[in-house]
Image (cartoon, rainbow, N blue to C red):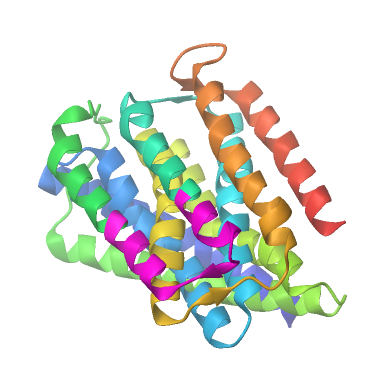
Amino acid sequence: MNFLFIILGLTLLIFGGNWLLKSAVALSLRLDIPKIVIGMTVVSFATSAPELIVSIKSALDGYPDLALGNVVGSNVANLAMVLAITITLSPILVEKSFYTTDWPVMMIASFLLFFFIKFDGLLEQYEGIIMFSLLIVFLIYLLRFQKVAVVDEMPEDDIPLPLYKIVLFFTLGGVGLWGGSELLIDGAVGLASSFGVSERVIGITVVSIGTSIPELAASIIAVLKKEKAISLGNLIGSNVFNILAVLGITAMITPIQVMDQRLLTSDIYWMLAISFLIFPLVFLPKGLRLGWRDGLVLIVAYVAFIVFTVQ
């Protein structure tokens, strides 16, 4: 049954990613909003839904390390696995907004999480409120100022859709991603638990990879359809959402207490390091571009992360 859940979950995720992308592109056309803004809001929220569901349920059920490990591992997987696979398939030209807005906000969110949990091992309710409030400010900034700041080239095959179809595809995509992730996680955790793997390791590896599958599906489909602004915006935005929305909302519902100290002594540093690594890779060797060589660097970093985590 576990294998069946995994296969069904992956199938739903692929279809969900495609439907979600259709709605996002159509929405950007209808509202005349740059696709990178849609990627960092609509798509990111929908693809972060699995992390939100898993983290809230884990924290309420008394598995805080699974909630925290899921987000830390998912953020690492988004950049070192999903982005790596995406740019290995096709290079991405990076917008100026990457270094003026997107990457700095992701680093601010990452360091904020670090300082909130490093010293007392507890993410409290008021800290969750601060994190979620910052997300609201960030989204307002994006929608008010980045609309004119981002230069967006529209591919010729973009077709406007009626509103009911946009809503239908978005709903189908969100449900597909959520249902697929649920099946995938149930199957993967069932397999991992049978080997006696710890809660933290399951969260950092199996669950985080499972909840990053929506980002992988949406990003690969975006690249294949030449919607690369959505692909990069989705990944950066998803990491911001994972920290500020997923952990912010979870902490607002119930404080998150770190149980396994390796989350604080190792895993959180890996997340910060790989988040930072994206910046020099964007500028070296060619400015504002990510190619297959950068993808190889990130894949090596991810393999090293997994090896150190499971030891």
In this picture, is 53 found above or below 294? below
Kindly identify the residue that appears in the image at 65 percent across and 79 percent down: 186
Q: Residue furthest top?
A: 286
Region rendered in magenta: 112-134
Q: Position of residue 46 (x, y in %)?
A: 37, 62
Q: Nearer the viewer, residue 115 or 50?
A: 115
In this picture, is 32 found above or below 284? below
Kindly identify the residue that appears in the image at 72 percent across and 37 percent down: 301
Instruction: Report if residue 221 is visible in the image.
Output: no
Kindly identify the residue that appears in the image at 49 percent across and 48 percent down: 110
Q: Position of residue 250 (x, y in %)?
A: 44, 74
In this picture, is 99 found above or below 69? above
Q: Position of residue 195 (x, y in %)?
A: 88, 75
Q: Position of residue 17 (x, y in %)?
A: 44, 56
The quarter of the picture where residue 202 lies is bottom right
Q: Does residue 163 belong to the magenta stretch?
A: no
Instruction: Report if residue 11 is visible in the image.
Output: yes
Kindly identify the residue that appears in the image at 59 percent across and 57 percent down: 118
Q: Nearer the viewer, residue 226 or 116?
A: 116
Q: How many marks?
A: 0
Type of secondary structure dominating the magenta stretch: helix
Left or right of 20? Residue 235 is right
The quarter of the picture where residue 86 lies is top right
Q: Does residue 123 belong to the magenta stretch?
A: yes
**Quarter the C terminus occupies:** bottom right
**Quarter the N terminus occupies:** bottom right
The quarter of the picture where residue 129 lies is bottom left
Q: Residue furthest front?
A: 119
